[in-house]
Image (cartoon, rainbow, N blue to C red):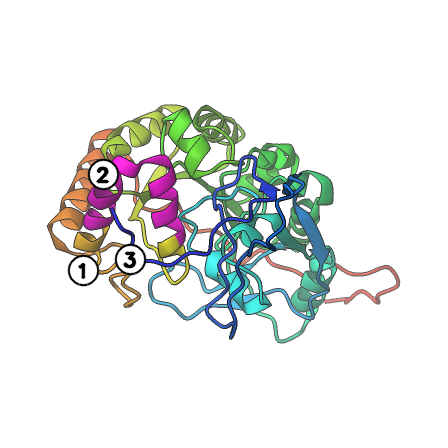
Amino acid sequence: MSLPFDLPPANPSERLRARGAAARPVGRFEPFARAPEHDGWDIPEEERLTRTEVSVERPRSVITRNQSPDVPFERSLNPYRGCEHGCIYCFARPSHGYLGLSAGLDFETRLIARPETPQVLEEELRKKSYHPNVLAIGTNTDPYQPLERKMEIMRAVLEVLQAYRHPVSIVTRGSTILRDLDILAPMAEAGLAQVGVSVTTLDAKLARDLEPRAPSPPTRIRMIRELSRAGIPVRVMAAPMIPGLTDHELEAILTEARRAGAKAASMMPVRLPHEVAPLFADWMERHHPGKVEKVLGRIRDMRGGKLNDPRFGERMKGEGEMAELLQQRFKLSCKRLGFSRHLPDLDVTQFRVPPRPGDQLELF
């Protein structure tokens, strides 16, 4: 199949290991494109392994406000930009374009850490004008990606939220979250924490290709089990469902997650905004060449003839017979398994600003 996209060829001197993308297409804001060009000398290029590079950003603010009617949170926070998990379908890939970087390999190899996030967060929470609401973390890039094991930014963020009794909702597929059970469990007991765990497939080989540096499917089921045993409400996120590739696993994913202790479930068909569409099509050509036409065709059937439909009210659920059938299967499975559609609301009334050393305490 001839793909309707023009991706630059991969750099022949780069050796990729466990990466989702295979090229560095320029972002949609860049005026020039770059591509490797043979210099005419018959001398083999020295091959080098592509490694992850980390830069540091010092943010002036960390709480992002959201007004989209399609997402159930009003404010969010991201400790990192880019994500080493390398999920090829990730809708957050185009956000790297705002940094002048590629949504392809740059997104998963050129990461930006924000180590001062906990301190900036605390200053924002201490403002007299601040009114508490649930803080969503992991809505763009994963706060528990591999880099977190070294940086521990997310753990420090949780320590701040615990001290302020501030509610938090986390979305992740990173097993490092289990390191923070000592913080999350008491917060959950007080009605201040809940977690969503993303499970895209139960096929280990497919998961390795789709999400090359994310934990394996059995590890994610174990995450659900251990979080649930610790008393933390868990929602399984069967997302994204890729028609013709992973959608047949919907019922099995929900069943395994329910057995592991998940209380609620959600599901979303895949969406491929901006640069993600050609990257995903290229991935399909490399890993499943015989299914390219079938999978892309079914995605278009669910997205009004396109690979992405950005309209509010449609982008998270799709449209057409395929999308409706998927939604019906999801609802029937949730009813059969006893899933709730939503976890219980978190408590925003406990928020308080702890005194700093030397602060004068109030008498009343």
Query: Measuring 62% from the left and 76% from the top, which residue is drawn there?
Result: 129
For residue 183, above or below residue 132: above
Q: Tell me, yes or no, if residue 53 can be seen here.
A: yes
- How many numbered callouts? 3
For residue 356, above or below residue 325: below
For residue 259, above or below residue 145: above
Q: What's the distance in space between the residues labelled 3 and 1, CA to CA?
A: 14 Å
Q: Earlier in the sequence, mark 1 or mark 2?
A: 2
Q: What's the distance in space between the residues labelled 1 and 2, CA to CA?
A: 16 Å
Residue that badge 2 annotates: 244
Residue that badge 3 annotates: 4
**Three-letter code, disc 3:** Pro
**Three-letter code, disc 1:** Gly
Magenta stretch contains residue 286: yes
Horizontally, is 220 left or right of 202 in the view? right
Q: Neighbour class for label 2 at 10 Å: few (<14), some, many (≥20)?
A: some
Q: Earlier in the sequence, mark 3 or mark 1?
A: 3
Q: Magenta residues?
A: 279-298
Q: Is the C-beta separation of discs 2 and 3 under 8 Å?
A: no
